[in-house]
Amino acid sequence: MKLSQSLIYTLPFLHSAAAQGGGMVGLPWTVSNVPETGLEEITFPIDISASPHERGFYFAQQFNFVGAPDVGYTGLQPRADINGQPIIHAAFSSFNAGTTSDDENCSDGADGGAGVSCAIDIVSPYEHQYLLLVENTQGTTWVGTLVDAVSGNGTRVGSWTLPGGSKGIKGSQLGFVELYAWNDGKSEHVCADVPKHGVTFGEPVAEGYEGSLGVPYEYGDCVGEIQYEAHTTADGAVAITVGY
Ligand SMILES: *[C@@H]1O[C@H](CO)[C@@H](O)[C@H](O)[C@H]1NC(C)=O
Ligand SMILES: *[C@@H]1O[C@H](CO)[C@@H](O)[C@H](O)[C@H]1NC(C)=O
C-alpha cells in the first residue's frame, strides 16, 4: 500500500485505504462498544482460496491504535509455488514513526515510510481459511500471528513496539484489495490485464465484542473496469472478486 499526500488532501475519505496505484477495493470493519482504551486483541479471518498462486495482490485489514496517528495492517499475499508446494505470505506492519522491533522477520520501514514491517512465507494450503491475530503482549508491544483455521496451528509473523503512550486497537477501520505490483509509479497499467483474484474477508473477532463488516466499494484507477463483484455470505463474511 502507498499513501499519496496529494490524494490524502483531496480524498479525505480514503485516508487509510490505498489511495493510488493498485488499490482497488475498500471494506470497512467495525467492532462495537470498544472501550476508550481500545482492544488488546483482534483477529481478522481471510480466505484466498479463489486466488491464483502468483505474486501481485495484497489482501489486508488495517487498524488504528488509541494515541497513535498512523495505521497498522496485517494480511495475506499469494506467492508462486516452490517445488510444487503452495506458499502463503503473511505481513504485519506498523506505519507509526518510532515503532521498533528486533524480531528476525521484521525490518524498519513500511512502504518506504516510517514504521516496521514483518513478514513470513510459509508452505500452507490456499484451500484453508487463515486467521490473522493481532494481540498485545505487554506495554505497547504487539504480536502478529498467522493461524490456519482448519488445522489450528499458527506461525508468528513478528512483533513490534509502538511509541509509549499508545493504547489498544480502535473499533473500526478499513480492509483493502490491492494489486501492489502497480504501486511502482508507472502509468502503463491496463485494467483489462488484471488477473482474476478472489478473497473472502470474515467478520473481525474480538472476544466479548461483536465484529462486523460494512459495504465494500471499488476505488482507484480501474473502477468499473475489472469485473468487480462482491457479496455478503450467510455468516457475515464478504466475498470479493476482481479481474479477468
Ligand atoms: C501448520 O503446520 C504445517 C505442517 O507442519 C505447516 O506446513 C504449516 O505452514 C503450518 N501453518 C501455519 C499457519 O503455521
Ligand atoms: C520467523 O519466521 C519463521 C517462518 O518463516 C517462523 O518460523 C519464526 O517463528 C519467525 N520468527 C519470529 C521471531 O517471529
Image (cartoon, grey):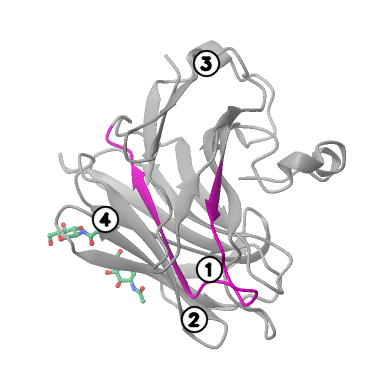
Give the label on residue 122, or none.
4
Dot 1: what SS?
strand
Specify the quarter for ligand 1.
bottom left
Q: Which residues are magenta?
A: 28-49
The residue drawn where x is 76% and y is 41% is 13
Give the label on residue 107, or none.
1
The residue drawn where x is 60% and y is 55% is 172
Dot 4: what SS?
strand
Q: Quadrant of residue 55?
A: top left
Residue 18, how many percent across, how many down?
Answer: 64, 41
State which mark lies toward you, 3 or 4: 3
**Going from the N terminus, do you reach mark 3 or mark 4 first?**
4
- In this rendering, position of residue 201 left or right of residue 9: left
What residue would you read off at disc 2? Answer: 102
**Going from the N terminus, do you reach mark 2 or mark 4 first?**
2
Q: Is residue 204 magenta?
A: no
